[in-house]
Amino acid sequence: MRGCLDRKAKGSVLLAFNLSFVLRKSITFMNSNPNPLFAKRSLLTAIGIGCALAGLGISWWKEKSRQEAVLSLEASNALWQAQLEASSSETVSLSDFKGHKLVINFWATWCVPCVEEMPLLDAFFQQNTAKDWKVLGLAIDQPSLVKKFLSQRPVSYPVLLAGLQGTELSRLLGDEQGGLPFTVVLNEAGQVAFRKMGKLHPEDLQSWLKI
């Protein structure tokens, strides 16, 4: 699980720090200035600048989030043009899932949190498949190990043998750290509605139903 703040959280902390810094400097200046009226005006000006910076920062993050929701052309092509072998040995075109609400879960048999979250994903798929939800498990592992694992712990959603192609695809979809498990949820328009590196929890899946 990611042990540091994501980029949006880092930006919020940085904005808060900068605003706090401006206010502290202004208060220090006001206390040391012999002209109370001038000091008060300086403080109000500093507050105004700080609020403006915070507003700009919030607007920037909203625009950034909107942009990140749209897949890059490279990621879109890699995703919808991919053809992968299923655990049942048939070839599956990911383009068949285009236009649906789609959960893509990258996992491996040796990844403990991946294995632990699979029953949760399976239950979600069974409960929501009639509501046009699709779930895909993309195994970044040796095909023989994946097939053996699924023979002992089967799931109802399709599992594809992604291998190295899956590693590159997960990177294009936002898994910059290359960690597992990694989950991406796309809406009907093919936009990213949810993205998480780390083990899924029930509240994550509940949030998907609002998409």
Image: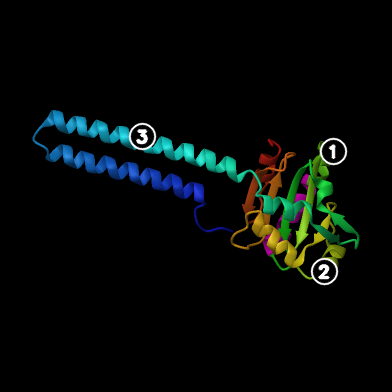
Q: Is residue 116 magenta?
A: yes
The kind of secondary structure the magenta stretch mainly shows is: helix
The N terminus, quarter of image: bottom right
Q: Earlier in the sequence, mark 1 or mark 2?
A: 1
Q: Relative to 90, does residue 121 appear above or below in the rendering?
A: above
Q: Is residue 174 visible?
A: yes
Q: CA distance from mark 1 to mark 2?
A: 30 Å
- Residue ID for mark 3: 51
Q: Amino acid at mark 2?
A: Pro
Secondary structure beneath dot 1 equals helix
The residue stretch that appears in magenta: 112-124
The residue mark sitting in front, 1 or 2, is 2
Q: What whole-number distance in Å separates the C-alpha atoms at marks 1 and 3? A: 47 Å
Name the residue at the front extreme: 73
Query: Which x, y percent locates residue 73?
Result: 68, 50
Kind of residue indicated by mark 3: Cys
**Circle 3 residues within 10 Å: few <14, some 14–19, many ≥20:** some
Residue that carries the numbered disc 1 in the rendered image: 130
Q: Which residue is mark 2?
A: 143
Q: Secondary structure at mark 3?
A: helix
